[in-house]
Image (spheres, rainbow, N blue to C red):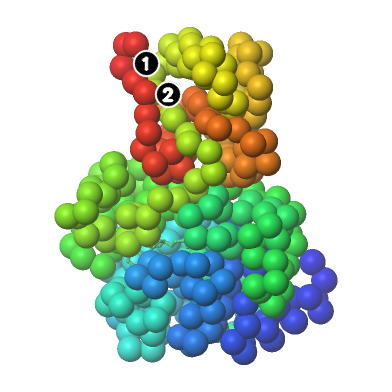
């Protein structure tokens, strides 16, 4: 990335402009995070509900101190271990953080990304950058600049193209503002990685299932349907073999009913299906490849005019928690339990 483009992005952000830029997780839609009017433009461009708070992105530890009213011991341990990187921490906020970016909450979400372009842009702007994923609210997050263009062309001042992102799923979010750390969103930093540092972290109830109307999720984003392709999607739960058999049966039934079906599978299983549309989300035995390609695959079904999507599930590895969390949300929690589950 050339320096003039970085400096221009910094200038736009330091004003009230919107810049989409790559991070190691997904592309972010950035604005000055200490200026509620700039942040309001993010909500407008994405069509994002105003009670869904934004994450502030910083480039150095010193930038955290003016934002967080308290930095508990666990937060220091986690920041030291995983920053810069795909981890967001929730702190009690200070007065300089506008309620317009926290969805009215007294807490603030902060992350220090590791992507070199993101870091240089934040430094060039000289302010914390509020940056949710750079997609229309509800759609799969962008993992390449083309996805940002698909959703936000004409609604942002600048898009910085840094190629395809490395991780492909949003950051792990941990609330450290209360007594014990609570995982609000699973991500690339898994329970297994956290355990040696802070012991067993609890999951928020809304992570494990659909937040009911009576539950007030701590991460307000949890209550919204996310990452969704346009067609109805069903996730088949069970062993890979059972899932394969059940999806084949569902494909036959869809064909008999005249419905055009798509299958979300892996390179290992693709050859088993006789389907009008097949899309591989990487290789099952390389979970990182599934994470990296998942959103691209979900988006690509929209161009295939399918009536329904049958998806395999991913439950064998530490990264599965994050992958299944996104997949189940994309499916609106529509699942089929295959034999033996
Ligand atoms: P996005 O940047 O679009 O991936 O979404 C940001 C996520 O962080 C959303 O799920 C928010 O609900 C969550 N989040 C941001 N700030 C807070 C906060 N102060 N408390 C709880 N969750 C938050
Ligand atoms: Mg998002």
- Mark pair 2, 1: CA separation: 7 Å
Q: Is residue 70 above or below residue 142?
A: below
Residue at 42 percent across and 24 percent down: it is 236
Q: Secondary structure at mark 2?
A: strand
Residue at 62 percent across and 42 percent down: it is 302
Tell me which corner region of the image, top left, top right, bottom left or bottom right, holds residue 321: top left
Residue 24 x, y percent position in the rendering: 60, 55
Q: Earlier in the sequence, mark 2 or mark 1?
A: 2
Total marks shown come to 2
In the drawing, what numbered circle is on residue 83? none
User: Is residue 263 found left or right of 243 in the rendered image?
Assistant: right
The answer to whether residue 192 is seen in the rendering is no
Label 2 sits on residue = 236
Label 1 sits on residue = 338
User: Is residue 297 found left or right of 47 in the rendered image?
Assistant: right
Residue 34 x, y percent position in the rendering: 47, 85
Q: Secondary structure at mark 1?
A: loop
Which of the two residues, 125 or 279, is positioned nearer the viewer here? 279
Q: Is residue 34 above or below residue 217?
A: below
Which of the two residues, 11 or 49, is positioned nearer the viewer here? 49
Which of the two residues, 126 or 100, is positioned nearer the viewer here? 100
Please state, as top left, top right, bottom left or bottom right, where the N terminus lies in the image.
Answer: bottom right
Q: Are marks 2 and 1 in contact (CB under 8 Å)?
A: yes
Residue 336 x, y percent position in the rendering: 37, 23
Q: Is residue 97 above or below residue 219?
A: below
The answer to whether residue 49 is seen in the rendering is yes
């Amino acid at each position: 990335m050339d320096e003039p483009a970085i400096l221009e992005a910094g200038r736009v952000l330091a004003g009230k402009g919107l810049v989409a830029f790559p991070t190691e997780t997904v592309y972010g839609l950035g604005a000055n995070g200490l200026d509620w009017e700039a942040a309001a433009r993010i909500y407008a461009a994405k069509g994002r509900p105003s009670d869904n708070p934004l994450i502030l992105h910083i480039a150095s530890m010193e930038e955290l101190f003016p934002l967080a009213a308290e930095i508990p011991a666990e937060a220091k341990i986690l920041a030291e271990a995983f920053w810069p990187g795909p981890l967001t921490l929730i702190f009690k906020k200070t007065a300089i953080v506008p309620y317009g970016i926290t969805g009215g909450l007294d807490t603030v979400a902060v992350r220090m990304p590791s992507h070199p372009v993101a870091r240089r842009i934040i430094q060039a702007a000289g302010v914390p950058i509020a940056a949710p994923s750079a997609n229309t609210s509800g759609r799969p997050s962008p993992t390449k600049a083309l996805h940002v263009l698909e959703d936000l062309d004409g609604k942002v001042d600048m898009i910085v193209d840094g190629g395809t992102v490395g991780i492909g799923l949003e950051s792990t979010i941990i609330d450290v503002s209360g007594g014990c750390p609570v995982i609000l969103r699973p991500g690339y930093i898994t329970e297994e990685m956290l355990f040696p540092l802070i012991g067993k972290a609890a999951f928020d109830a809304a992570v494990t299932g659909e937040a009911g109307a009576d539950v007030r999720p701590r991460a307000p984003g949890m209550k919204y349907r996310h990452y969704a392709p346009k067609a109805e999607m069903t996730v088949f739960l069970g062993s890979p073999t059972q899932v394969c058999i059940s999806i084949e049966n569902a494909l036959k039934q869809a064909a008999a009913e005249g419905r055009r079906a798509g299958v979300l599978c892996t390179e290992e299983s693709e050859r088993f299906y006789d389907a009008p549309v097949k899309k591989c989300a990487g290789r099952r035995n390389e979970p990182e490849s599934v994470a990296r390609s998942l959103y691209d695959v979900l988006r690509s079904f929209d161009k295939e005019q399918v009536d329904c999507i049958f998806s395999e599930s991913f439950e064998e590895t530490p990264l599965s928690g994050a992958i299944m969390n996104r997949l189940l949300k994309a499916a609106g929690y529509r699942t089929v339990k295959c034999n033996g589950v």
